[in-house]
Image (cartoon, grey):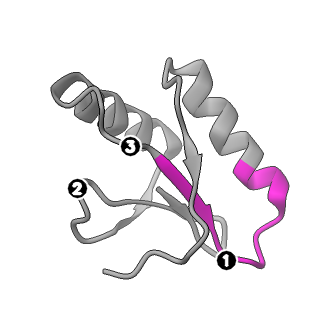
């Protein structure tokens, strides 16, 4: 998942196209559904360099609260 420069959220599943403009709730539902199907799927969070780090922390916290126990940070921007 990705947080863009405007704080908008996006999600890519299985290296597919990034779906942008999702709410955090929509992303949590989709991530949990993917993990039900593929429990070993990696969950990665990335953000535009202009996004305050607090936005990334809030996203990580929401994933943790939703039961997603293992989340990594992307070091390169997502390219679809």
Tell me what residue is drawn at x 49 percent, y 25 percent.
Answer: 68
Q: Name the residue under label 2.
A: 14
- Pointer 3 with pointer 1, Cβ within 8 A: no
Identity of the residue drawn at 33% across and 69% down? 18
Q: Nearer the viewer, residue 34 or 5?
A: 34
Of the residues under marks 1 and 2, which one precedes in the sequence? 1
**Direction from residue 40 to residue 59 in the image, left or right:** right
Residue 67 to residue 4: above or below: above
Residue underneath mark 3? 42
> Does dot 2 land on a helix, a strand or a loop?
loop
Q: Is residue 74 left or right of residue 22?
A: right
Tell me the mark number nearer the camera, choosing from 3 and 1: 3
Q: Does the magenta stretch include residue 54?
A: yes
* Residue at horizontal 16 percent and vertical 28 percent from the top: 37
Q: How far apart are marks 1 and 2 (CA)?
A: 23 Å
Whole-percent x and y of residue 34? 24, 35
Of 58 and 35, nearer the camera is 35
Name the quadrant containing residue 46.
Answer: bottom right
- Say which of marks 1 and 2 sits in front: 2
Q: Which residue is drawn at 38% across and 43% down?
A: 42
Query: Marks 3/1: CA distance?
Result: 23 Å
Chain-order first, disc 2 or disc 3? 2
Gap between marks 2 and 3, in whole Å?
A: 9 Å
How packed mark 1 is, by other alpha carbons closer than 10 Å (few <14, some 14-19, many 20 or more), is: few
Q: Viewed as shown, does residue 30 lie left or right of 66?
A: left
SS under mark 3: loop
**Magenta-highlighted residues:** 44-56
- Location of residue 40 by image quarter: top left
Residue density around tag 3, few if under 14, some if 14–19, many if 20 or more, within 10 Å: some
Residue 52 position, x and y percent, is 83, 64
Image mark for residue 5: 1
Disc 2 crowd, CA 10 A, few/some/many (<14, 14-19, 20+): few
């Amino acid at each position: 998942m990705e947080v863009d420069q405007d704080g908008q959220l996006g999600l890519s599943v299985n290296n597919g196209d990034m779906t942008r403009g999702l709410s955090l709730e929509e992303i949590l539902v989709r991530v949990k559904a993917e993990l039900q199907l593929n429990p070993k799927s990696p969950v990665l969070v990335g953000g535009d360099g202009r996004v305050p780090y607090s936005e990334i922390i809030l996203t990580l916290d929401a994933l943790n609260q939703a039961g997603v126990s293992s989340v990594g940070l992307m070091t390169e921007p997502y390219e679809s």
